[in-house]
Amino acid sequence: MLPAGSSVDCLSAKLVHDSVSALSPALMNIFNISLSTGVSPMVFKDVAVQPILKKPGLDRTIYENFHPISKVPFLSRALEKIVHGQISAHMNSNSLLDVFQSAFRPRHSTQSALIRVLNDILVASDSGSRVRLPQLDLSAAFDTVDHHIFLDRLGSWVGVTGVAHQWFYSYQSNRSISVQIGDCASSCLPLPWGVPQGSILGPLLFSIYLLPLGKILNQHGLSYHIYTDDCKLYIAMDEENAGSRLAACLDDVKGWLASNFLKLNERKTESIIFESHNHHGSHPVCDLSTLNPKQCVTSLGVKLDPELSMAPQINSVVRSCFYQLRHLTRLRQILKRRHVESVIHAFITSHLDYANTLLVGAPVSALNWLQVIQNAATRFLTNMHQHSHITPVLELLHWLPVIFRVQFKLFCI
């Protein structure tokens, strides 16, 4: 068993937790020496990669269906957290991150990114414009980051120099990797490129690597939003030369990606056209068939249709929640009440609440299907009769009905 994930971990998380008062002075001394000298300890650089299936039910014989999650030593994660706090504070105080990069930033999330994008699309649709939204998919983006390019970007775009720059050079140098499946692990091999997926620093380093991409998109006058390696472009199709501008922008993006050792996965890159709510005459037609036009796309876990009715998303949530409820019924007899409630919040309520601000304005008949899910979960928790009145029980549990949960989330945001 590997408590912290790495096959060469010198201290487990449990050991550090149980002995924190005795170990903390020595550990802080190690971390301070590392940061003051610009040297990352060699023992922190061995990474054990555990393949995780991207979605349940995918073919396990196809390597592309796995995420290569890096399990770094526990102490390395502790040091990375310190560095992450310092570099994040520097970038936030100096406004160095792309305004429309939402990943791993305070008060930014997938939900805030979706709200911003869909708000812009709805405004354009209400004014009579059709909006095209391509979603760019990068192939193995974290694994192909070039260290020399990153270090140059760290200095020229972020202003990290001196000992701090030297520390990042040391952090990326002489790394090794092994693959771990169950109790078996491969031999270690050098890892001369990439940032570790699953590490604390990895997503932030990748966001720094992508900083010039926003400048390219701005030059073509396109609206965009980036969440780590998920990039959405959108443009109103009645704008002047909208199709040619989008095509030119995509060509420049492909060229920039290639020069930075990143690859656009054209097979998984999809696009959708959102219909206008107030049609004002004809709209120019442009041939962008290479963008794989779809009638429904999944964006950061939310299914979007051309009319933005949110019906595909609601149907998906209903199916997923009923699936979870059927499986939870098998555990009802062996779990205590408080545990059942925790499980319901983890597998049911979290689905009902995710990105539910996008359901503002959805028909009540559609929201009623989500209310059916909440009612079923309430009866499952309290062993209520199927025909019992549900409202008093929801009040007793302090569970807001679905329509009020939507409004509450909107007010909080």
Image: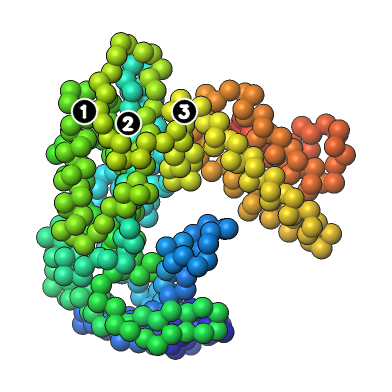
Say if residue 201 shows up in the picture: no
Residue 132 is labelled as 2
Helix, strand or loop for disc 3: loop
Give the label, 3 or 1, closer to the camera.
1
Residue located beneath label 1 in the image: 242
Q: In the rendered structure, which amino acid carries the disc numbered 2?
A: Arg
Query: Which image quarter: residue 175?
Result: bottom left
Instruction: Identify the secondary structure beneath mark 2.
Output: strand
Q: Which residue is mark 3?
A: 308
Relative side of 358 to 365, left or right: left
Its colouring scheme is rainbow
- For image coordinates 20% across by 37% down, the residue present is 247
Indicate the amino acid at tag 3: Leu
Q: Is residue 243 above or below residue 175?
A: above
Q: Is residue 322 left or right of residue 313?
A: right
State left or right for residue 209 relative to residue 72.
left
Which one is earlier in the sequence, the residue at label 3 or at label 1? 1
Looking at the image, do the residues carrying marks 3 and 1 touch, with CB atoms under 8 Å apart?
Answer: no
Q: Which mark is residue 52?
A: none
Q: Residues within 10 Å of mark 1 (few under 14, many from 20)?
A: many
Q: CA distance from mark 2 to mark 3?
A: 13 Å
